[in-house]
Amino acid sequence: MTERELFIKGLRDFADFLQSHPTVKVPSYVSIDAFVHTREDIIEQAKLGHWQKVYNDTWFSLHKEFAPTLVYNINTERDVVCQRVVKGTRTIPATPERTIEDVEWVCNEPLLAGRER
């Protein structure tokens, strides 16, 4: 059995276990994460379904909710999808003093044009 087949079987076995034991507590929240490393890979994954795009300072994710407490994310580093543009720097008075970059993310090309859901 491949790793993928084992994973899918494990999910089915888990669902069957919960279904046949109705008093067993279900997890309060499950986030399943997969990772890709190239723009081509994230575009290929985006074409395979309807996703919500989620960004933070470091990551871009294709997000799909299967239940309010069960989500699946396909993640890549944000700079794979967007361009990080340094708009300037600021000095933070502290001991020791430090300088930080003021950054803007520019995401011009629509990765999932018209496919968000």
Image (tube, rainbow, N blue to C red):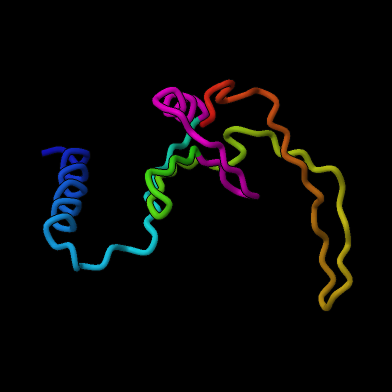
Outermost bottom residue? 95
Rendering quarter of residue 34? top left
* Residue drawn 43% across the image and 24% down it: 44
- The residue nearer to you, when weighing 43 against 96, is 43
Q: Is residue 71 above or below residue 29?
A: above
Q: Is residue 101 above or below residue 117?
A: below
Q: Does residue 34 appear left or right of residue 83 in this picture? A: left
Q: Does residue 8 appear left or right of residue 97 in this picture? A: left
Rendering quarter of residue 114? top right
Rendering quarter of residue 113? top right
- The residue nearer to you, when weighing 52 against 83, is 52
- The residue nearer to you, when weighing 8 against 19, is 19
* Residue drawn 43% across the image and 44% down it: 65
For the image shown, how many numbered marks are present on the structure?
0
Q: Does residue 7 appear left or right of residue 95 in this picture? A: left
Q: Is residue 66 above or below residue 99?
A: above
Outermost front residue? 22
Highlighted magenta segment, given as a residue range:
39-61
**Relative image position of residue 4 (x, y in whole percent):** 22, 39
Quadrant in which the N terminus appears: top left
**Relative image position of residue 58 (x, y in whole percent):** 61, 49
**Relative image position of residue 72 (x, y in whole percent):** 40, 44
Q: Does residue 27 appear left or right of residue 21 in this picture? A: right
**Relative image position of residue 53 (x, y in whole percent):** 56, 37
Please say whether residue 84 is one of the residues in the magenta stretch: no
